[in-house]
Image (spheres, rainbow, N blue to C red):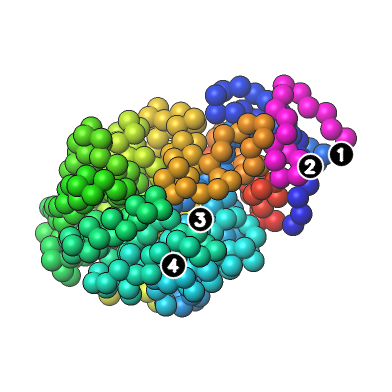
Amino acid sequence: MSTTTFVLKGGTLVDGSVRDVLIEGGVITTIDKSIANNQATIIDVTDSIVLPGLVDLHTHLRQPGREDAETVASASRAGAKGGFTALSAMANTSPVADNAGVVEQVYRLGQEAGLLDVFPIGAVTEGLKGETLSEIGAMADSIARVRVFSDDGMCVFDPLVMRRALEYIKKFDGVIAQHAQEPRLTIGSQMNEGEISARLGLRGWPAIAEEAIIARDVLLTDHVQSRLHICHVTTAGGVEIIRWAKARGINVTAEVTPHHLLLTDDLASSYDPIFKVNPPLRTEKDVHALREALADGTIDIVATDHAPHTMESKECEWQEASFGMLGLETALSIVHKTMVETGLLTWEGVAERMSLAPTRIAGYKEQGQHIAVGSVANVTIINPHKKWIVDRDLVQSRSRNTPFHGFELPGVVTHTFFKGKLTLDNGINV
């Protein structure tokens, strides 16, 4: 895969203008109504949207330790197919990414795959145990230049540890990404607490378990004057706390997953563990609140929480199944369905929430740039007029646990460019 000269013909930019885009040497060099270049490969993108490359702030790549479920290389292929040019690798690997050695290993694996940027996220605490701070400074100073720290999969439940982490990362303008789950309120929980959990006889996961941690941590963040990011918000109450915090000027950002924008807890009635996820699917009321919050900016970004699992981990009884769903290859189409087709977001809004804002939060280099002359050519092309049917047997991930198997979704990602290199061509990985 080598950098080549391309002309993207007749694409629609997020401001609605129809333009040709010239990519040379990994950079966008010209944008005009008509570009002629005899040395360029011409790609007709008429009727398609030209977006800045998508950036995921929440991805589980599983390597090192669980290569049976996913590798950095397979996740990179899945990311490219979904239109992503950067993934953020969560720290809950084996061994845990709580030191410079592991984050540098993940960083190098991403470079070797060469399909997108892989930015490691460092653990907040040693072994994700929530007790002792990890080697935060060493990870920040490593070649991976870690700036986002998270125990995702586990909550940093001790308020003193959380305070110390928030204080520490101020030295280099880092951010703590919190998995908001009060563990004492969710022991043995299997799905959203409510009418359906009671009927199914599955232990409920109360919304307050998420909201209590969000409330605590925005207050800690305000006290310390640091930066907080809330992972995978799922409840209407959580949205209101974040809205209150932002109104007070507290430096908090938040994300929502595509599956929480579309799916609800009634799907658990099938007892199919494909719908078992952490945090759980919530109610229609919550889904509506999440969509409105993403539209008005209370929730800043969409992040996939791509969580691959082996067949053995998901094709079993609900109580024994692992939590998690695939997300990379379907994310943009689900945002199209839930936010664009409903009129809640324009394509400019999609670019902001899936590329520009994640980049600002994490401080990534050469990502999240507008489609403009001089920008690095990280570009995603989606044809919003085409539809496709999700087939778990055709995904690029090593795992097959997509909850969207058989769904017809709008919008086909046809091309992805990473630093001017074509990594997806007409929907096929290069």
Residue identified by numbered label 3: 87
User: Which residue is drawn at the image coordinates 59% and 28% (left, top)?
Assistant: 13
Q: Are marks 1 and 2 in contact (CB under 8 Å)?
A: yes
Q: How would you rate the neighbour count of disc 3 (Cα within 10 Å): few for under 14, some for 14-19, many for 20 or more?
A: many
Number of marks present in the image shown = 4
What is the magenta range? 23-39
User: Looking at numbered disc 4 in the image, what kind of residue is underneath it?
Assistant: Ala
User: Relative to 384, is 283 above or below?
Assistant: below
Question: Label 2's element?
Answer: loop
Question: Which is more N-terminal, label 1 or label 3?
Answer: 1
Query: The residue under label 3 is which amino acid type?
Result: Leu
Residue depicted at x 53% and y 69%: 104
**Cα–Cα gap, marks 1 and 4:** 46 Å
What is the CA distance from the residue labelled 2 to the residue labelled 3?
25 Å
Identify the mark at residue 138; answer none if there is no mark: 4
Q: Position of residue 59 (x, y in %)?
A: 44, 59
Q: Of label 4 and label 2, which has the lower sequence position?
A: 2
